[in-house]
Image (cartoon, rainbow, N blue to C red):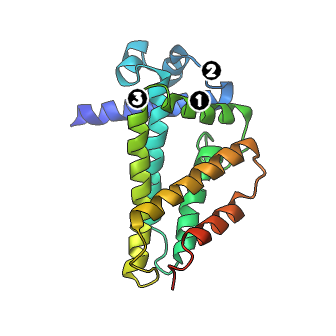
Amino acid sequence: MASYRTSQLTKDRIYKSALLLFAEHGYAATSLTDIAKAAGVSTGTLYRYYPSKGDLLMRIGRKSVDHLDEFARNLPESMPLVEKLAAVLEEDLKGVLLRLLSADGSFGELTPAKRELVLAYRAEVYMSLERLAQEREVRHRLCAVYQYLIKEAQEAGECDPKLDVDVASQLVESVYFQELDRTIDDPQRDYQSFIRRKLSIILAGYLS
């Protein structure tokens, strides 16, 4: 048990060291050797956990969904469905664009290095069928977060039970990726306003 915990701590330390280096020096300019040195491990140990930088990238998606699931379940019950979904989408966007690579966990500027990392992640996803399958699993779990909120609203009588939860969650997912792409291109974009407008259209006629 202690060995497993030590292994997980080492894996997490490598991951966090990599993100900080990517933020400071850029994804392309950071080598696995740099990451191993920053994490205080041998290159052999690093390769055992992360055979490539791409493996580090793919963990970003998994970690993000873990956080969003917990975030969604802790939203106030009294919050309207549109606001809950918007809060999750905004938390996701902020995590990718601002907070993800800040050493102290605070919001920061969308630097060229951060933008490069987001684009590298998107490129990695389509690098192979294996990567695409991993990303599909991440997106499936992401949709499950939206489904949880919609079903919760249906059970509370706020949302029409006739609403197709699967389809609605996929449409919400599409809003996230649309706003992510546009905000990467224009960091000053008022994505909060666009998110709410799009969610209101998706749920039009289904809210009490």
Label 3 to label 1: alpha-carbon separation: 16 Å
Q: Is residue 184 left or right of residue 91?
A: right
Residue 160 x, y percent position in the rendering? 43, 80
Residue 30 figure quarter: top right
Q: In the image, which disc is placed on residue 180?
A: none
Helix, strand or loop at label 2? It is loop
**Label 1, residues with CA under 10 Å away: few <14, some 14-19, many ≥20:** some
Label 1 to label 2: alpha-carbon separation: 9 Å
Q: Is residue 29 above or below residue 208?
A: above
Q: In terms of sequence position, does the residue under pointer 3 or pointer 2 come before the other? A: 2
Label 3 to label 2: alpha-carbon separation: 22 Å
Q: In the image, which disc is placed on residue 129?
A: 3
Task: Tell me the residue that label 2 is attached to.
Answer: 28
Q: Is residue 35 left or right of residue 62?
A: right
Residue 1 figure quarter: top left
Q: Tell us which disc is closer to us: 3 or 2.
A: 3
Kindly check if marks 1 and 2 are in contact, taking CB atoms under 8 A apart as contact: yes
Task: Tell me the residue that label 1 is attached to.
Answer: 120
Helix, strand or loop at label 3? It is helix
Q: Which residue shows up at 51% across the image and 81% down it?
A: 207
User: What amino acid does circle 1 point to?
Assistant: Ala
Does residue 145 appear in the picture of this structure?
Answer: yes
Q: Which residue shows up at 71% across the image and 65% down it?
A: 193
Residue 98 x, y percent position in the rendering? 66, 46
**Label 2, residues with CA under 10 Å away: few <14, some 14-19, many ≥20:** few
